[in-house]
Amino acid sequence: MNDAFDMRGESHIEVHKFRAGAIIISTLLALVIQASFPIHFTKAAILDLPLLVTIYFGLSRRNPSTGLLLGMVIGLLQDSLSGPTVPLGLHGIAKTIIGYLASSIGARLDTEHPAARFALTAAFFVAHQGLMVLTRRILLAQPEPWFTMHLFVAALVNALVAVFLFLLLDRLRKN
Amino acid sequence: MVAIPSRHKSLVLLAGIIVLQVLLLAVQIKRQSQGRLIRVWTVGAASPFERAGSYGFGWIRDTWRHYFALQNTTKESEQIRRENDALKLQITQLQGKAAEADRLAVLLNFRRSHGEVPMIGARVIGTGAGTASLTIQLDRGERDGIRKNMGVITPDGVVGKVVEAYPNASQVLLLTDKESGVGAMLADSRIQSPVGGQGEPLLVMKYVPNDDEVNLGERVITSGMDRIFPRDLPVGTVAEIKSGNPFKLIHIKPAANLERLEEVLVLLSLRPLEMKNEENTGDAQPPAPGAANPRPVAKR
């Protein structure tokens, strides 16, 4: 499974590689499912699949440049599909930073254990929403609450889904 | 030239990309431009997949509701059960089609009863890809006569307005979005006040003075003052009233089920519309410049 190694600092760091097209197809699928699923299953709107994909590939690839670029692309695509009331860059900025943080943290911590994945995803989800609120408040002058109960529940739900989704995405790794 | 240490390269890249996106945001705000070209490409590329996804998930949902949910109730023999299951699957498909036909029949009846208002049926094929806005995506666009700022309704009530029209798809801002609003009035007292979204299931009516009497359950209808929706379309019912200063804070339950939209009607007009059952007062304002009605085509 672990076919590539990278020397950073003191330790050997596993860098996972994926089958050809896996990242692109996963990203597009996440965006399409995010846009289609809640029509029929309203509660599914609580999920942020593009964010989960950003986190997963960030944690797995462990290259900050790749992580932030992937986050930027996913975020901008999400902005494009969210209608003109969402300016291009809102999700883009948040996901760029999350992609960078995920790949930086992935290079320092064990992120293969389900408990670690659960905790990291919940933390990244809250950070992502915090960045969105910050962008809205500072750059767009739109008052948004920092914390709601919905955010807390959404973070837990997304973290739980991430544990299973990440296991599924692990299968796309090159053996 | 100062060389950047390799370990800082990604940090510099991060800073550069963030700055670029902040500039992109600033440009959009300054010029009121919404990056239309990028959106047209993205939506154009994604809408066929969304369409397929919408049908696929609809099939899964119907199968789950009508097949798996019923599967455990039968105690017949294995052979009969298999046959039964096969028939249930067929019934599921037929039920889905029948339900769709019923919904379309309601839309058709509504359209016939408001023949003077040009409108077109459209199917909901997607929602906003994030939680930042409450939008839906329709399978009809500019080629079907849909334009920005057209009203979207169901026979139950107002849904929202078109905020972007692409060649084969369009995006609708739901009434519940924070940036959404509709000219409305209370049906009994005829008190007028805009009704807006707040990003939650209930709408809010803000400008009704404390002295005016409002009753729970009172119907709220369109006033026609927004020049998008004709008068007397249902908006919702009063669900909660709180005193405020100087206005009451009235929460409205939307008449249309905005969380479960599958087919909608788009009002193909940018001129102020009049419904059949209202008087022609003759004081309607002239249409806005450039607000010509596109020719309705390919009505569903």
Image (tube, rainbow, N blue to C red):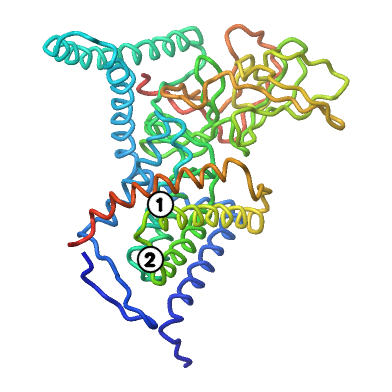
Residue drawn 69% across the image and 29% down it? B204
Q: Distance between the residues labelled 2 and 1?
A: 17 Å
**Side (left or right) of B162 relative to A160:** right
Residue for point 43% across, 82% down = B7
Mark nearer the N terminus (2 vs 1): 1
Q: Which corner quadrant holds the C terminus of chain B?
A: top left
The numbered mark at residue B198 is none
Q: Where is residue A45 in the image (x, y as percent from the top left)?
A: 46, 37
Q: Residues within 10 Å of mark 1 (few under 14, many from 20)?
A: many
Q: Is mark 2 on a helix, strand or loop?
A: loop
Q: Looking at the picture, do discs 2 and 1 lie on one chain?
A: yes
Question: Which residue is situated farthest in the left direction here?
Answer: B79
| B206 to B13, vertically: above or below | above
Q: Splitting the image into 4 quarters, where does residue A60 fall?
A: bottom left
Q: Mark 2 falls within which chain?
A: A
Q: In what element is the residue under mark 1?
A: helix
Write down the quadrant of residue B3 in the picture.
bottom left
Residue topped by disc 1: A52
The residue sitting at the bottom extreme is B1
Residue B97's x, y, as percent? 29, 15
Q: Mark 2 points at which residue?
A: A110
Does the residue at mark 2 contact the one at mark 1 (Cβ under 8 Å)?
A: no
Relative side of A146 to B189, left or right: left
How far across and down, in percent of the image, does residue A13 sit?
A: 33, 74
Amino acid under disc 2: Asp
